[in-house]
Image (cartoon, rainbow, N blue to C red):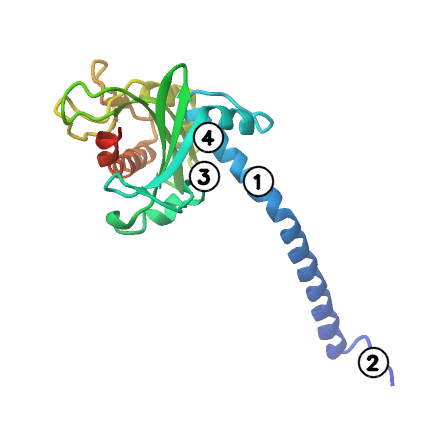
Amino acid sequence: MTMKVQNNTYTLMYSAVVVLIVATCLAVFATALKPAQLRNIEIEKKQNILASLRIVSDKASAEELYNRYIVDSYTLNTSGEQIQNIDPFAVNLREELKKPPGERNLPAYVGARNDSTFLVIPVYGKGLWGPIWGYVSFMKRDPVKEGMPYYNVIYGVNFDHQSETPGLGAEISQDFFQIPFRGKAIFDEQGNFVSVKVVKGGADPGSIHEVDAISGGTITSRGLQAMLDTCLVAYEFYFKSVD
């Protein structure tokens, strides 16, 4: 007895077979493409780290430049101590920020160029419409007096976003916003952490702790300010105690 193709049973069986075939194909493709996707994420991350060191790279050169300029990497706790057996490249800062401060794993990357040593740290926060993130690099210096940090002055930053408003909050990824962070200090003259202030209406030109906020991007600017405050202070003990 042949099944009538017009009846409901046939339709349901046919649909189920089609769905199963499509799902299987998608799973196979996803599995096959995953290594390439992870590789692209790794390359982009290396490009962003290099960008905070003011080193321009592309997908073809990122690996070679990263290996040339990043000489060490490790994971820290908020006491400034290195944590063994945790790959900093595998640490998800978004997930770490959900933990109590004392339980967070903090990635750190050490750069070297032109006879100077740099520390690069990731930052992650929330903008108006979604996450914002980036990397901040600091040039190592000898502390001028006891209690002053080895890492204080910003060498470069690289910020990005997921869905901020074009022409407004999305401008955090543009050079005109990022370049003014260079040379800004996150500790005051007494060695107290003060972060960098993103000032609406214009930063004081003489301040080493202020940059201009984005015109019309108030909420994104506030989110970036909160991101810097939260992420940078987590490294305070390491900034001051590193050899």
Circle on res. 48: 4
Q: Residue at x 21, y 13 (%)?
A: 206
Instruction: Please say if 178 is above or below 6.
Output: above
**Mark 2 or mark 3, earlier in chain:** 2
Residue identifier under label 3 = 162
Q: How many marks?
A: 4
**Mark 3 or mark 1, earlier in chain:** 1
Would you say 158 lies left or right of 210 here?
Answer: right
Q: SS for tag 3?
A: loop
Residue identifier under label 1 = 39
Determine the image quadrant of residue 24. bottom right
Q: Residue at x 47, y 20 (%)?
A: 55
Give the amino acid type for the residue marked by disc 3 in the picture: Gln
Separation (CA) of disc 4 from disc 1: 14 Å
Q: Say which quadrant the N terminus sits in.
A: bottom right
Give the amino acid type for the residue marked by disc 1 in the picture: Arg
Residue 124, percent from left and from top: 36, 39
Give the amino acid type for the residue marked by disc 4 in the picture: Asn
Residue 20, percent from left and from top: 69, 66
Circle on res. 3: 2
**Mark 4 or mark 1, earlier in chain:** 1
Instruction: Please say if 164 is above or below 97.
Output: above
Q: Nearer the viewer, mark 1 or mark 2?
A: 1
Residue 111, percent from left and from top: 40, 25
Instruction: Please say if 102 is above or below 140.
Output: below
Q: Is residue 142 visible?
A: yes
